[in-house]
Image: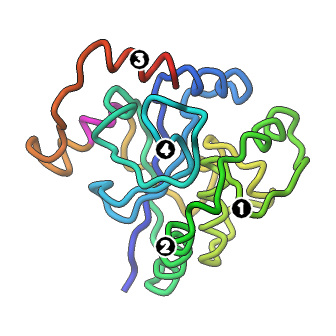
């Protein structure tokens, strides 16, 4: 029986996101992978602590909280076999089990800026590189370029991916989870502002 994997592209409006956007010239500059339409099991490489963008690595993300509260998004779906689904999920579980060995690939972002695969790092990823890599692990070769050159915008050009939603992320969660589950307790205005300025 076929299963579905979701690629979630977001614009969190943070300072780091805006800086990346200067190079990519796109608004949706963060990529995540999720295994359910409610996005309760969503993974990427990004900040480990909400208030500090420079301590980053493998993360299980909460789409209803923190920097995602005001995020715009595009959600793409991909039909895969049960075997492909399990291979991708098992790869992520392996990374999660050994997450302290993994780092955010800040150096790799410079490769994106100059469009060159300049330095290969085995245990370091940025968000879209991570998503492209684990999809490759499932034998879903989406790109002819190296995962280290994949930007979030490239997922729009993948034939097996279908866009199922574009707009406010919290509105999507409201539709899929219902009001009680999708909305966390609102953080203060000042805390929200701090997250964005320090992102």
Q: Disc 1 to disc 2, how far (Cα)?
A: 14 Å
Any mark on residue 123, and which?
Answer: 1
Magenta range is 167-172
- Residue in the image at 18% along x and 37% along y: 184
Outermost residue, left direction? Answer: 180
Query: Which mark is nearer the camera, 4 or 2?
Result: 4
Relative side of 187 to 11, left or right: left
Badge 4 or badge 2: first in the primary sequence: 4
Question: On the image, which quarter does residue 29 sit in?
Answer: top right
Q: Looking at the picture, how far across and down is residue 175, in whole percent?
A: 18, 45
Q: Looking at the picture, how far across and down is residue 171, in whole percent?
A: 24, 35
Question: On the image, which quarter does residue 123 sit in?
Answer: bottom right
The residue labelled by disc 2 is 93
Q: Disc 3 to disc 4, how far (Cα)?
A: 16 Å
Numbered disc 1: secondary structure: loop
Residue 70 lies within the magenta run = no
Q: Looking at the picture, how far across and down is residue 84, in whole percent?
A: 52, 81
Q: Looking at the picture, how far across and down is residue 16, in whole percent?
A: 59, 25
Taking 37 as reference, is 52 above or below it? above
Numbered disc 3: secondary structure: helix
Badge 3 or badge 1: first in the primary sequence: 1
Q: Disc 3 to disc 1, how far (Cα)?
A: 30 Å
């Amino acid at each position: 029986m076929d299963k579905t994997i979701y690629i979630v592209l977001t614009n969190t409006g943070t300072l780091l996101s805006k800086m990346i956007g200067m190079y990519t010239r796109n608004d949706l500059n963060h990529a995540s992978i999720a295994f359910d339409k409610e996005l309760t099991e969503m993974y990427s490489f990004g900040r480990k602590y909400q208030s500090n963008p420079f301590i980053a690595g493998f993360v299980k993300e909460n789409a209803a909280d923190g920097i995602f509260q005001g995020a715009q998004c595009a959600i793409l779906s991909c039909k895969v076999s049960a075997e492909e689904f399990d291979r991708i999920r098992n790869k992520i579980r392996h990374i999660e089990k050994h997450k302290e060995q993994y780092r955010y690939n800040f150096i790799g972002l410079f490769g994106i800026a100059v469009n060159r695969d300049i330095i290969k790092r085995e245990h370091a990823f940025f968000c879209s590189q991570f998503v492209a890599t684990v999809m490759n692990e499932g034998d879903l070769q989406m790109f002819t370029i190296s995962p280290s050159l994949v930007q979030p915008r490239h997922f729009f050009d993948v034939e097996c991916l279908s866009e199922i939603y574009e707009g406010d992320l919290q509105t999507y969660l409201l539709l899929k989870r219902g009001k009680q589950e999708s909305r966390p307790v609102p953080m203060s205005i000042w805390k929200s502002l701090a997250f964005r300025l320090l992102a």
